[in-house]
Image: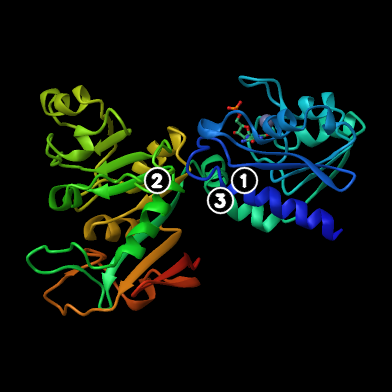
Amino acid sequence: MSDDLNHMRAALALARRGLGNAWPNPAVGCVLVRHGQVVGRGWTQPGGRPHAETEALRRAGARARGATAYVTLEPCSHHGRTPPCCEALEAAGIARVVVAMRDPDPRVNGRGLERLRAAAILVEEGLCEAEARALNAGFFRRIEAGLPIVTLKLATTLDGRIATATGESRWITGPEARRAVHAMRARHDAVLVGSGTVIADDPDLTCRIPGMERVPMLRVVADARLRTPPTARIVATAGSAPSCIVTAPGHPPAALSPFIAAGVAVLTVPGAEGGGLDLRALLSALARRGVTRVLAEGGAGLAAGLLRAGVVDRLAWFHAPGVMGAEGLPAAEGLRLAALAAMPRFRRVAVRPLGADVLTEFERLEA
Ligand code: AOF
Ligand code: ZN
């Protein structure tokens, strides 16, 4: 029993390698074990194919015969670019399959397990289910609600300020915290900022950690009024890293064409009451493009808009040990709270010192 647990944990660790680059697919891990020996390992490859099982079977070759497969998600049963994983497992002579949880994708949804059982393969499900569910929360949200999960990242002083009154913000947090942000970007499918941040900071929004630069992460600007300068880095670099501007309807085609010519995808979603974009509509437009995990990086208007819309699933709050006072710019602006009872609340899940700073991670507390 504890061997099963160890192998499934190893499969979960492999699965995590796909976070941020397996989309639109879930990040799955697979470990093949025969006579107590690991004979193959695999995880979902960039872009979602090959699947984890295919990778593990390829590595195991003939040693897969009679082995147990530990998979973090039910093996697929549909014909995609390659035959279904459950057929591949059967053809390789796998004797037993342990899966952490079912795949809610309507093309699979229990049929993978059924087919394995029909092939006289021993099937067990539910080992480490909670971990597997948390790992692919973004994929499940996309399948079940047509939305990605959203992590809101904020880097502030102790009193919640993101810049001085004159807009100085480089840098509030130290190098360790900033490196952690780059690593977070790599684990997300898309990074989202408001147009104010593009105008103020002209960020690259890439992951510049050596070895992690090439994940196909999408850079998204929420820009109802189309204020992004066509000279912004996010536009200029659209050829090497995908970028997308989401705007409100009604802009003349000539206003959009410099972006489109630079290779930026331009999406249109309805505006929100009181300005900005309908952020739920923005997120569902991203989910339709396959995005499962969004890292929102501010500024203050976007942060408040996301909190107001109730779509922030996780908060990653970096606190730098400094104080700016009320003249500094706040992290969230325009929350328009009617009463304390309406305040978005979160549950702390982790605290991590990073150099001089502290990262606190939170999850949404459901009302
Ligand atoms: C697996 N192993 O590693 C993954 C699976 O578009 P396709 O044909 O690649 O299929 C995508 C679906 O396959 C996806 O929606 C999910 O249900 C499943 N993902 N399945 O057996 C894997 N990533
Ligand atoms: Zn598959």
**Counting other residues with Cα less than 10 Å from the Cα at mark 2, is it few (<14), some (14-19), or many (20 or more)?**
few
Q: Residue at x 61, y 28 (%)?
A: 50
Specify which label sits upstream in the sequence, 1 or 3.
1
What secondary structure is marked by label 3?
helix
* 168 to 260, vertically: above or below: below
Q: Position of residue 98 (x, y in %)?
A: 80, 45
Q: Amino acid at mark 2?
A: Pro
Q: Amino acid at mark 1?
A: Ala
Q: Position of residue 4 (x, y in %)?
A: 82, 54
Coloring applied to the structure = rainbow
Quarter of the rendering containing residue 309: bottom left
Q: Quadrant of ligand 2?
A: top right
* 298 to 203, vertically: above or below: below
What secondary structure is marked by label 2?
loop
Q: Amino acid at mark 3?
A: Ala
Q: Nearer the viewer, residue 342 or 323?
A: 323
* Whole-number angstrom distance, CA of label 3 to CA of label 2: 27 Å
- The residue singled out by tag 2 in the image is 210
* 317 to 204, vertically: above or below: below
Q: Residue at x 41, y 63 (%)?
A: 315
